[in-house]
Image (tube, grey):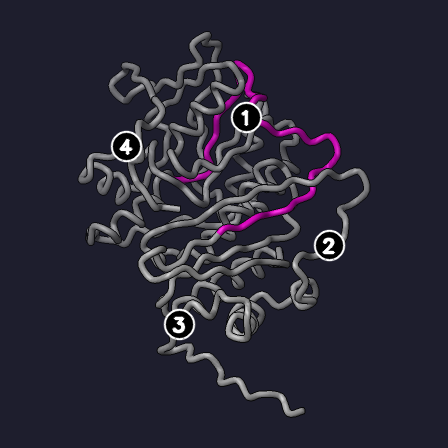
Amino acid sequence: MKKAYIRPLDLRHGTVDLSHGGGGRAMVQLIGEIFGRAFDNEWLRRGDDGAVLPAPRPGERLVVATDAHVVSPLFFPGGDIGCLCVHGTLNDVAVMGARPLYLAASFILEEGFPLADLQRIVASMAAAAKEAGVPVVTGDTKVVEKGKGDGIFITTTGIGALPVGRELSGANARPGDAVIVSGTLGDHGMAIMAQRENLAFESEIRSDTAALHGLIAELLAAVPQTRVLRDPTRGGLAATLNEIAQQSGVGIVLDEAAIPVDPQVAAACEFLGLDPLNIANEGKLIAICPAQFADALLAALRAHPLGTRAARIGEVTVDAQHFVQMKTAFGGRRMVDWLAGEQLPRIC
């Protein structure tokens, strides 16, 4: 019997419709022409409901992290929801000290979503995954009725291998440890906000979205004594350090003058009444290590393109209240508290 001819997807003018999520021929075509082509690899090509994957090296443990991405707008200076969902999940795996191995992706599409935008997002994901050396090996696609979604939501899961003896955790900080950041704070959140609010500056604010596992590998090779790594995403530096202080049962004191913030980001925050310490980052990390290794850790960060503006910004202290405080430029102190409510919704 002759195989029925299937008209190729109209990737310029076509849109997602409910049949693309119905499990039939249209869904197979969407997956094949957009997802299959972009993410092509030996595991995905099998077309099974899951992927049978090579095991990590003997003695290594598996690390799994998952993240949902609902960013609005979908495209922003420096990136888009596609590369963001790859970077965000890889970083969650990497800050555990693991070597990222594989990604899985789940898409919720709204009826009427332009196929051209879907292809652009998937191409961005594929490029980010290829650059990181971490393939997307399995996934799922669902379509909801028009008005029941917001274009596209993406959930990604990352799997990594953790070497024997490596134990990084937010519970490991000790009094006297140094607190270090890998670069300027608030870039991602303010890139999103500037786009939403149509704010114009002398130079464009761009998201810092990036995969950090290469930087982390070099950092840990130089300073295996590192105790804590975190990526300060939603809630920014303030939320992440408060979380670490609670987990470790310590206090943290920051030096305001040492915290790197791009002048454009600082100006945007001042205009909108926001604190850069509460703004999300997608390509920065916080490292905490014994003070005697701080210089070596800073050198390792600054030697990498993603860490050129790394800075030592504070220290871990004894504090029964587990407060995070700031030594201000005026010589006083202020609390750096958890964010109350959602300051910047839909930023990642």
Q: Residue at coordinates 44% horizontally, 14% vertically from top-left?
A: 322
Q: Which residue is identified by label 1?
A: 170
Q: Residue furthest right?
A: 58
Query: What kind of element bears circle 2?
Result: loop
Q: Is residue 293 above or below residue 52?
A: above
How far apart marks 3 and 4 lie (CA) works out to: 37 Å
> Tag on residue 53?
2
Front disc: 1 or 3: 3
Say whether disc 1 or disc 4 marks the residue closer to the N-terminus. 1
The kind of residue on which mark 3 rests is: Ala
**Residue 292 in the image: x percent, y percent?**
58, 21
Tell me residue 42's x, y (percent). Answer: 70, 66
Q: Is residue 160 magenta?
A: yes
Q: Residue at x 43, y 40 (%)?
A: 309
Q: Which residue is the site of mark 3?
A: 116
Q: Residue type at mark 2: give it.
A: Leu
Helix, strand or loop at disc 3? helix
Which of marks 4 and 3 precedes in the sequence?
3
Mark 2 residue crowding within 10 angstroms, few (<14) / some (14–19) / many (20+): few
Where does the magenta region start and end? 155-184
Label disc, if present, on residue 275 of the rendered structure: 4
Q: Any mark on residue 241, and which?
A: none
Q: Residue at x 23, y 42 (%)?
A: 268
